[in-house]
Amino acid sequence: MSHAWLLRAVAVAAIGALTLASLPAGEREAAAVARTQPYGAGGEWIEEDLTAADRVGAVLDGDRIRVRRDGRDGRGRGSGRDGDMPLVASLRESGTGRPADRLAPDTRTALPRTLEREVGAATATFPVHDLDDPVSSVEVAVDAAGDPAGFRIEVRGLRPDGIWTEWREARGPGTVARRTGPTATTSRVNGRWVALAAPAEGVQVRVGITEGADADAALHGVRIRPGPAHAPADDSEAEDAGEPFSARVFATRIGLVGGTTANGHRVRVHDHFVALPSRRGLAARGGGEYTVRVCTTGGNRRCAYMPVWDVGPWNIRDDYWNDGREMWNDLPRGTPQAQAAHRDGHNGGADGFGRKVRNPAGIDLADGAFREALGLRDNAWVDVDYLWTATYAHRAEIGTASETDPVIVRPGPGAAFPASGLAAHKANVDVICQVSGDRATGPQGESDVWYRIGEGDYVPAAFVRGGHTAPACEGPEAEEDGGAEAAEEPAEDHSPAPSAPDGAEDTEN
């Protein structure tokens, strides 16, 4: 089987203002991906270690990574770094709760060829490379077998303030050698610069193999070379003066319990994560580097803080929260393409794969988030803050001992205040201020400190890594000490959800 260095691409990483040390250790260890030794920006190539990649839907087979074709390869079902085939939320059939390409033969819907070329059958996410000097570009060279159209190479950068830029697809200049016999046919790959904001102190690469890739498609090697600390600016992730971008979108329930998300997570009944219709904001397995705040719109306001662990609904290249979105630039920022298709007949009423859009969904919620955190019984409109789109003043990470249960969010610093939402394990939040309240005991020890992480949203510091540099709260919140009772955190009872807000639609994507 022949292979050649097939793609060279350039990506640009982003900026920040603090030091890399502010990044919580938990995120650095997300998805069990070890960090490598620092490299300078002197132009040397860095050879990626295939054995160190976090593999989803893929298996390490000798000197190559290939798509996992059955459940007997690797180290077993769902174990370690070899995950099951990812079932992205965008593939669910309306009302079935099952992905279209995993239905029984007599009921399945064939994947359109365009969808096969887009949807990832497998991914390999390589370790983060800490750099001695900031860089603004990364050259990527991939050694692979198969049609290069079946591979998707993405790069992201770690800003000095500890916030990741979004993933950007690397489509730089290079050559492709495709051998069908004793001679090779070589064709040119047209590429582009993937420009983010400015220099980064760490870089990471992710390689995907699509559903439509050749049967013998395999990844044999990946090299990256950090570039100079200057590059064209990209304002597609423009910050909103310290405030995250917000949008009101229609939320549906993911379901798919027992399946595997696009980042390799095995879906559980009481899970707390979301899906957004773009891989640009897809967190690493078990990570919370891309976190959203989702709040109900009815009178009984509830909010949930959750990481992005899947891709969907409907589309997979619709980063509608960005100024310069990857597709559908004719739509205003904050309007999902599915919403425009359902409401206004955009794209003939179809999604990016030509499927008729049956609801305006712009976000999918895992079962625990849908029922327990937000108290929804039906699909509904929600307000979403895309927290990574702003600058974090005092970044922190939610954490529980079980690593599955969320932390209760309350409107004041004590257990006497009623629960008003949940914050998922690994969710990244910005601590606005801190105040004394009820004592609580958690992974960070015992403390009477509570953090305000949003308007009227408090969590005990005992369940938060970081955030201790936040200033004291001023005004009414500084006097809202709820008493001496210990806070009942984290949430573990999975109690029945309250009624859903009025006006919710009942059609699931």
Image (spheres, rainbow, N blue to C red):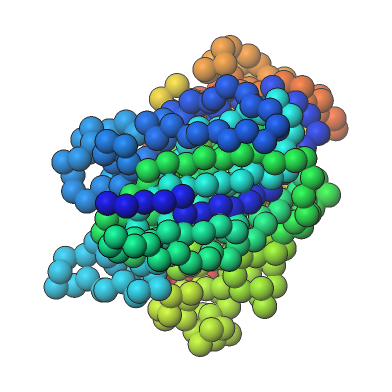
User: On screen, 13 above or below 384?
Assistant: above
The residue lying at 64 percent from left, 50 percent from top is 11
User: Which one is in front, 39 or 436?
Assistant: 39
Q: Position of residue 107 (x, y in %)?
A: 19, 72
User: Which one is in front, 260 or 174?
Assistant: 174
Most distant residue in the top direction = 446
The residue lying at 64 percent from left, 61 percent from top is 192
Could you tell whether 486 is left or right of 261 in the image?
A: right
Q: Position of residue 475 (x, y in %)?
A: 85, 32
Q: Position of residue 479 (x, y in %)?
A: 79, 26
On-image quarter of the C terminus:
bottom left
The residue lying at 75 percent from left, 40 percent from top is 228
Q: Position of residue 363 (x, y in %)?
A: 51, 60
Corner quadrant of residue 211:
bottom left
User: Which one is in front, 258 or 118?
Assistant: 118
The residue lying at 48 percent from left, 25 percent from top is 34
Most distant residue in the front direction = 182
Q: What is the number of callouts on the image?
A: 0
Q: Is residue 206 visible?
A: yes
User: On screen, 480 above or below 64?
Assistant: above
Q: Is residue 452 visible?
A: no
